[in-house]
Image: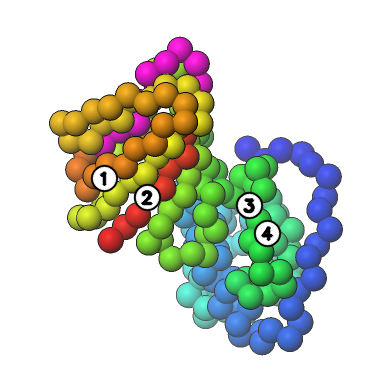
Amino acid sequence: MKTNSPPKPAKPLALAKPAESIHRDLGSRLKHLRAARGWSLEALATASGVSRSMLSQIEREQANPTLAVTLRIARAFGLSLGELLEAPGAGSAITVIRADDHAFHYRSDKDCRIRTLSPLNLEKDVEFYEVRLQPGGALRSSPHFEGTREFLTVQKGRVRIESATDAEELSPGASASYRADVAHAIINAGKGEAVVFLIVIYR
């Protein structure tokens, strides 16, 4: 999934940041990146050439990886070393998610592509997504936690929103909010690609 692009200059690391803090952030970052890609520890081990046991220890903050190991992990995710080690509060106060950063591609198949637009290190009380549905495509979801709601805005195409037994059809510029603690779906109701922006709020 990774596209070829000119190498980005590495962002300067916050050298004053304690080493143990960097390793703690790396463990958390690894978990979020794996979850975003749907990778198991075995899958990451295969992609990086780092053993599953070492990766597990890093995620549990029980190992301090060498620079070479950390670089192999970064390359497996298509990131620079600086991007992998970057943590909240290190360097810029602005978090940027690039359109070609495939670590944020939550799902991609012929009918549906989902890209998360919220930083992976945020607590998951709120999630923000771009959803692209091809003609005939649908995103059907089982009930989330009690009290969860979704807020959706249509940027392109026509979509049908279903929440339990209720349904509405939306055109570009329209927004809707609905219960997501029941079975719900976003369905492409048009003849072309549909693009929506989706916010999920957990209570």
* Residue type marked 1: Ala
Q: Is residue 109 above or below residue 37?
A: above
The local crowd at label 4, few if under 14, some if 14 to 19, many if 20 or more residues have their Cα within 10 Å, is some
Q: Splitting the image into 4 quarters, where does residue 13 fall?
A: bottom right
Label at residue 180? 1
Q: Secondary structure at mark 3?
A: loop
Q: Residue at x 31, y 30 (%)?
A: 161
* Residue in front for this viewpoint, 23 or 151: 151
Disc 4 and disc 1: Cα gap in Å?
35 Å
Which residue shows up at 65% across the image and 43% down it?
Answer: 99
Question: Residue 57: where, in percent of width, then height?
Answer: 51, 73
Q: Is residue 162 magenta?
A: no
Q: Is 64 on the left or on the right of 173, as rendered?
A: right
Disc 1 is placed on an element classified as loop
Residue under numbered circle 3: 97
Quadrant of the image occupied by residue 165? top left
Give amino acid for label 4: Ala
Q: Which residue is mark 4?
A: 74
- Residue identifier under label 2: 200
Q: Do the numbered discs 1 and 2 sit on residues whose CB atoms are within 8 Å?
A: yes
